[in-house]
Amino acid sequence: MDVFEDEEFWIELDNDGYALRQMIVGENNVEMSCFTDCLAEGVVALDELAGEIKIITQDIFEYKWDKYIKNFKEEWENKKKNIILVNK
């Protein structure tokens, strides 16, 4: 989690440092990478981010994600049905 200019940036990273999911939580709005183009591109370099950075557990990220996604549950379920999974 990164706090910068009164917004919280919640970013789930894979083992290589690439963003998998992201939320930008402001006072009056929430942007989620499953709905808007707010997903970090490339490897996220934690030492280059501005603001307060806090490493959190997967459980905490899931809690926060579920908290905001519940308002868009039906839309999210429809989007997930249209996702094509690609194996590496």
Image: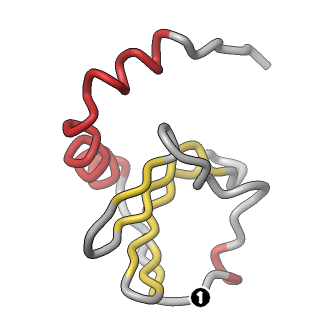
Q: Is residue 32 above or below residue 54?
A: above
Identify the colour scheme used: secondary structure
Along the viewing direction, whichever of 61 and 41 lies nearer the viewer: 41
Please tell me whether residue 88 is drawn above or below residue 42 in the rendered image: above
Q: Position of residue 42 (x, y in %)?
A: 79, 55
Query: Which residue is depicted at the point 27% across and 34% down?
Result: 72
Category of crowding for the residue at label 1, using alpha-carbon neighbours closer than 10 angstroms: few (below 14), some (14–19), many (at least 20): few
User: What's the residue at 46%, 20% (across, down)?
Assistant: 79
Instruction: Give the quadrant of residue 24.
Output: bottom left
Looking at the rendered structure, the kind of residue marked 1 is Ala
Identify the residue at image location x=47%, y=85%.
4
Q: Quadrant of the C terminus?
A: top right
- Place of residue 60 in the rendered image (x, y in percent of width and height, measured from the top left): 27, 54
Picture quadrant of residue 10: bottom left
Residue 28 higher or lower than 72, as above or below: below
| Secondary structure beneath label 1 | loop
Counting from the top left corner in percent of width and height, residue 25 is at 35, 66
Residue 33 x/y as whole percent: 52, 46
**Residue wearing tag 1:** 50
Does residue 87 appear left or right of residue 7 in this picture?
A: right
Left or right, 81 with reference to 86:
left
Name above or below for residue 4 compared with residue 13: below
Q: Residue at x 58, y 16 (%)?
A: 83
